Amino acid sequence: MHELPLILFTLLVQASVGVMCVFACFSPKSLAPTQRTLAVLFICFSAGLGLLASTLHMGYPLNAFNALRHFASSWLSREIVFAALYLGLSGIALLCALLRRTPPRVLLFAAALCGLVDLLCMSAIYMHATVVTWRHINTLFMFYGSAALLGAVFSAWILPLSPRALRVLAGIAIAALALRLLVQPDYISWLSDAARSEAVTFPHYPLTAFRLLSGMRLSAWISSAVGVLLFTLAARRGKSPLLLSGCVLIAVAEILQRFTFFSIQ
């Protein structure tokens, strides 16, 4: 399954950035040392595992260092730099947590900012590729949407958030889903124009794969919508089986969405 490294890379890094943003916004001073350590450990582990998975997609991983020489002109170079900055700042935050100290808020916000810029670079890499199903602003909405949705899902279970904080996360999840849906009509119109112009990405056939996976895409949208609904309903009650069901459905939807994204035959 050649898509697996890229699926793991993008989803794990996006989940890590999402949790970091939540962790930075809700004061870590209110958390016990063990809770702070667990949160930052997840952030670092998720990002580190994702970046490790990305090297499995490279024919020769050491060539990644050569990409750093083109920061001014290459989105890949920028993505590598900001990913390294994000992981480095997250590592410093983890060190602070392990020393039973509260990571400085400025450090957490700096890490979150680097992570968000990294997602922008990650999105731009695919938006500037030759694959027609990627070359639309839909890719940007999908990647940032994953960070928002997965960040809400994992934060709800890793961090001891108040009911008010859970309601805020539910609002973010609703907004992320709504923005994704709003961009879909223009995205479908874009793909229809591409099909009429007989766009070809030899040796890949992304439009054919897009049509063949329509059932999986529909399942992903339904799973995401139901998951966000359950997450929102459960946000008023705190952690409950209803909240768990919503989180699982959202996570499954993201995996399905990302699989269809990278399935270009």
Image (cartoon, rainbow, N blue to C red):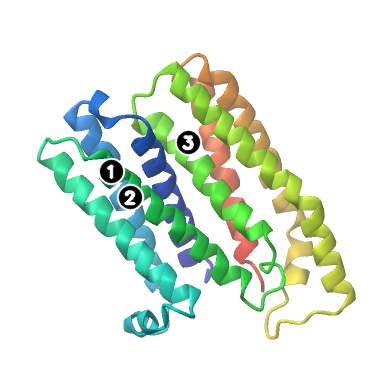
Q: In the image, 37: left or right of 126?
A: left
Q: Position of residue 190 (x, y in %)?
A: 81, 64
Q: Residues within 10 Å of mark 2 (few under 14, many from 20)?
A: some
Residue 48 at least partly seen? no
| Residue highlighted by disc 2 | 110
Q: Nearer the viewer, mark 3 or mark 2?
A: 2
N-terminal of the two: label 3 or label 2? 2
Spatial CA distance of label 2 from label 1 is 6 Å
Q: Which element type, helix, strand or loop, lies under badge 3?
A: helix
Residue type indicated by callout 3: Val
Residue corresponding to mark 3: 153
Would you call the spot at circle 1 few (<14 residues within 10 Å), some (14-19), or many (20 or more)? few
Query: Mark 3: few, some, or many residues within 10 Å (few <14, many ≥20)?
Result: many
User: Is residue 108 visible to the viewer in this orientation of the structure?
Assistant: yes
Callout 2–callout 1 Cβ contact below 8 Å: yes
Q: Of the two numbered discs 1 and 3 on the same chain, state the one appearing first in sequence.
A: 1
Residue type at tag 2:
Ala
The circle on residue 106 is: 1
Residue 233 is left or right of residue 187, and the answer is left
Q: Quadrant of residue 19?
A: top left
Q: Which mark is residue 122?
A: none
> In terms of secondary structure, where does tag 2 sit?
helix
Q: Are marks 1 and 3 in contact (CB under 8 Å)?
A: no
What residue lies at 57% left-to-right and 47% top-to-bottom?
145
Residue type marked 1? Val
Q: Is residue 80 above or below residue 37?
A: below
Query: Element at badge 1?
Result: helix
Residue that appears at 64% across and 27% down:
229
